[in-house]
Image (tube, helix red, strand yellow):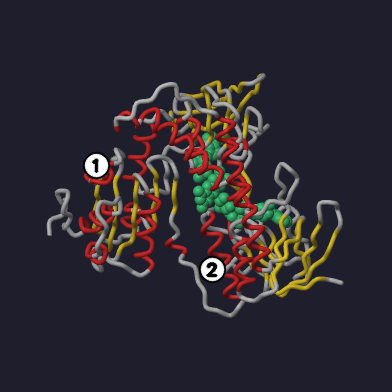
Amino acid sequence: MTQKFDVVVIGAGPGGYVAAIKAAQLGLKTACIEKYQDKEGKTALGGTCLNVGCIPSKALLDSSWKFHEAEHGFKAHGINHAGMSMDVPAMVGRKSQIVKNLTGGVATLFKANGVTLLEGHGKLIAGKKVEVTGKDGTVEVVEADNVILASGSRPIDIPPAPVDQNVIVDSTGALEFQTVPKRLGVIGAGVIGLELGSVWARLGAEVTVLEALEKFLPAADEAVSKEAFKTFTKQGLNIKLGARVTGSKVTGEEVEVTYTDANGEQKIVFDKLIVAVGRRPVTTDLLASDSGVDIDERGFIFVDDYCATSVPGVYAIGDVVRGLMLAHKASEEGIMVVERIKGHKATMSYDLIPSVIYTHPEVAWVGKTEQTLKAEGVEINVGTFPFAASGRAMAANDTGGFVKVIADAKTDRVLGVHVIGPSAAELVQQGAIGMEFGTSAEDLGMMVFSHPTLSEALHEAALAVNGGAIHIANRKKR
Ligand code: FAD
Ligand code: AMP
């Protein structure tokens, strides 16, 4: 007999699994379909984020940062050590264990919440039915009142550098190196390229990043992207801007990459090459020709502000739809959709999705940049506070970067918080909470912040917006 559900979710990434759990919590009979299998051939939940994205990359970033600090930072604290070495397989093994724990955790949450897991490939067919093809090829059709498409994204391939997952790898392959490559190339100076490049640079690789654009981190506030470029370069990342990769030739265990820059055609040889030129939506065999769901010109499933597709009762969330390709955006869309299915009035604050690059220093922001606001003709006041003036940052010997708060000159409402520095992601989140409730710079400035904390830098930057910072000379006078 055909199984029937209130909600069927296709894809168990941070969009899909969160939506499924929320739906079950709200009393909806829910199934989630997932096809991904780990190296042992077991279905693994959690999508890109838990398996080959956010979590494993952060595990390697944290391990490599500890090694880097031990090598370069401990001396300043009076800690002397000798004979330190890096066991790369152990580091990668730790990462894999974390992935296993977390993906297993999602399976446990499914059981605890009563979400039915259907293992296999899901395809939406007409009439809100979903065809599930299991590992063994068996096909089952399930029916649903509501279907949520959450099939995510995958790395973009570029013809000049075809991925072989040996010498030329994508982000997934770059999480599995068993030795530190001597010469590592990275195509693309986006978030993923910078994070993965940093991991291997900290462990001793000579890293060259080839970026086609002339501008570094174009989405970030210019003050932040300039500081980031300066800092990453000082750390040893050789970032070549305006360098478009046009070809590559693998010979044995090395690759010769051809790129063009202002001086014409150039060649460079690497031991490993990471292709990190962005991600594209996954819609392969997801929609039957009569499903009725529209896809936009870039391959994303077309949705409105509430993630509704062109078919009533069919929704799409996360990386497979427009907007930032971020796990928290996917999850919140999932929650919004399920709440709306339940008849609740839920919306998403698309303007307040924080972005983070987990390098060291971290780079994070929420809201608009100074350049965007000026281009929009908004009059603004800006307050900046350097971590060099933060007692907590000094105690930690981690004083690079700054916090920048931008407020509307007329209303004092905070319009953007931009941070480069230690714990930038956490500081920006505090700004995001305030901005969600329409905070003014003065409000933030009047709050009591614990001392000594890095958060005080946010407090002082907010005070500086109106010329009231205590621990630096204010650029703006009251
Ligand atoms: P996905 O996580 O891609 O999940 C989709 C799932 O659907 C997959 O499991 C897939 O197997 C399954 N699926 C697809 N089609 C079908 C089908 N037809 N039937 C059944 N199952 C199907 N984001 C952050 O917010 N913070 C970070 O720090 C961060 N770091 C990242 C680092 C790396 C190296 C990478 C690659 C990505 C990173 N991201 C990060 C991005 C983040 O992983 C994605 O934005 C997020 O996973 C998107 O969630 P999703 O649920 O939309 O899709
Ligand atoms: P993101 O989409 O943020 O992950 O960034 C990917 C980056 O890769 C973008 O900044 C692109 O400009 C860059 N890129 C794409 N194709 C090439 C190429 N052929 N050579 C160098 N950089 C590229």
What's the CA distance linking mark 1 and mark 2?
A: 42 Å
Picture disc at residue 58 = none
Residue 278 visible to an observer of this rendering: no
Vertical comparison of 425 with 194: above or below: below
The residue depicted at 12 percent of the width and 56 percent of the height is 477
Picture disc at residue 388 = 1
The residue depicted at 25 percent of the width and 58 percent of the height is 462
Q: Is residue 205 left or right of residue 381?
A: right
In x, y percent, where is residue 131?
A: 80, 62
Q: Nearer the viewer, mark 1 or mark 2?
A: 1
In x, y percent, where is residue 36?
A: 71, 50
In x, y percent, where is residue 58?
A: 50, 44
Find numbered disc 1 in the image and state the secondary structure of the residue it sits on: helix
Crowding near pointer 1: few (<14 within 10 Å), some, many (20+)? some
- Find the residue positioned furthest to the bottom: 343
Of the numbered discs 1 and 2, the one sitting upstream in the chain is: 2
Amino acid carrying label 2: it is Asp
In x, y percent, where is residue 338?
A: 60, 71
The residue depicted at 32 percent of the width and 28 percent of the height is 75
Q: Is residue 81 left or right of residue 381?
A: right
Crowding near pointer 2: few (<14 within 10 Å), some, many (20+)? few
- Find the residue positioned furthest to the top: 252
Residue 447 lies in quadrant = bottom left
- Check disc 2 and report the residue beneath it: 305
Nearest the camera: 156 or 431?
A: 431
Quadrant showing the N terminus: bottom right
Q: Is residue 274 left or right of residue 432?
A: right
Vertical comparison of 358 with 185: above or below: below
Residue 377 visible to an observer of this rendering: yes
Vertical comparison of 179 with 457: above or below: above
Amino acid carrying label 1: it is Ala
